[in-house]
Image: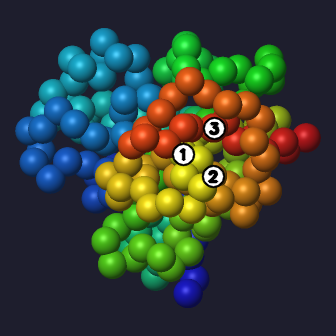
């Protein structure tokens, strides 16, 4: 299996992975941590899609996409923390003053799960951030200790996924998702 991870610059590929089924919906498109809460709540229907289309033209784009034989099969949100709501989040601590990048949302298309796509996305996101000069990458997964995580809530990833990629726990957080504590995992790139 040849998985290629590329920056999320193609809006149609982003929409295929994280766009709502109903185009007039005011959910998803992975905007809740990427833009401020006020803007996120105000974006409805086509305005959400237009905002993501704009973000796909930004440098850096809103994340990375995994492709299998040219088909988009997985998404990971990735961006400098300073430009996300994690910069002001009171539940997710700052470990230090480094200008870290945050990696926070995963979506694997049905039919492609349990094939290593998440691992490829983490590796590709880290490579992309490293290439852009990021000193470290942080993630905020659940610490499920091997217990099953509701598929809907698994979007943040699980601790073992990041440990497998060399991330280490840097801090506890005040955030809980689906009954599991979230931890701050970090990979130093310096």
Quarter containing the C terminus: top right
The residue identified by callout 2 is: 159
Residue visible at 54% across and 52% down in the picture: 144
Q: Earlier in the sequence, mark 1 or mark 2?
A: 1
Q: Verify CB contact (< 8 Å) between mark 3 and mark 1.
A: yes
Q: Name the residue under label 1.
A: 142
Q: Does 98 sit above or below residue 154? A: above
Farthest bottom residue in view = 1
Which of the 4 image quadrants contains residue 163? bottom right
At mark 3, the secondary structure is strand
Dots 3 and 2: beta carbons under 8 Å?
Answer: yes
- Image coords of residue 67 (percent x, y): 48, 71
Q: How far apart are marks 3 and 2 (CA)?
A: 8 Å
Give whichever of discs 3 and 2 has the lower sequence position. 2
Q: Image quarter for residue 188?
A: top right
Circle 3 crowding by C-alpha within 10 Å: few under 14, some 14–19, many from 20: many
Left or right of residue 54: residue 129: right
The colour style of the image is rainbow
Sequence-wise, which precedes: disc 3 or disc 1? 1
Dot 1 crowding, Cα within 10 Å, few <14, some 14–19, many 20+: many
30 relative to 61 in the view: left or right:
left
Residue 20 in the image: above or below residue 91:
below
SS at mark 2? helix
Q: Residue at x 56, y 74 (%)?
A: 116
| Image marks 1 and 2: residues in contact by CB distance under 8 Å | yes
Is residue 78 among what the camera can see? no
Residue 54 vs 3, above or below: the answer is above
Residue at the disc numbered 3 = 183
Query: Is there any visible trace of residue 31 in the rendered image?
Result: yes
Q: How far apart are marks 1 and 2 (CA)?
A: 6 Å
* Residue 104: percent from left, percent from top: 53, 41
Mark 1: which secondary structure? Answer: loop
């Amino acid at each position: 299996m040849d998985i290629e991870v590329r920056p999320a610059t193609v809006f149609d590929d982003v929409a295929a992975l994280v766009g709502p089924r109903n185009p007039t919906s005011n959910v998803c498109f992975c905007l809740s941590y990427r833009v401020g809460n006020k803007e996120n709540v105000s974006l409805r229907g086509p305005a959400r899609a237009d905002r993501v289309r704009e973000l796909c033209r930004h440098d850096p784009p809103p994340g990375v996409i995994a492709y299998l034989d040219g088909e988009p099969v997985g998404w990971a949100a990735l961006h400098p923390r300073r430009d996300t709501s994690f910069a002001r989040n009171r539940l997710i601590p700052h470990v230090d003053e480094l200008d870290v990048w945050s990696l926070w949302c995963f979506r694997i298309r049905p039919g492609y799960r349990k094939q290593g796509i998440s691992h490829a996305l983490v590796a590709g996101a880290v490579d992309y951030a490293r290439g852009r000069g990021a000193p470290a990458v942080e993630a905020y997964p659940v610490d499920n200790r091997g217990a099953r995580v509701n598929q809907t809530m698994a979007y943040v990833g699980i601790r073992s996924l990041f440990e497998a990629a060399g991330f280490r726990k840097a801090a506890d957080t005040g955030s809980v998702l689906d009954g599991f504590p979230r931890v701050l995992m970090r990979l130093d790139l310096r």
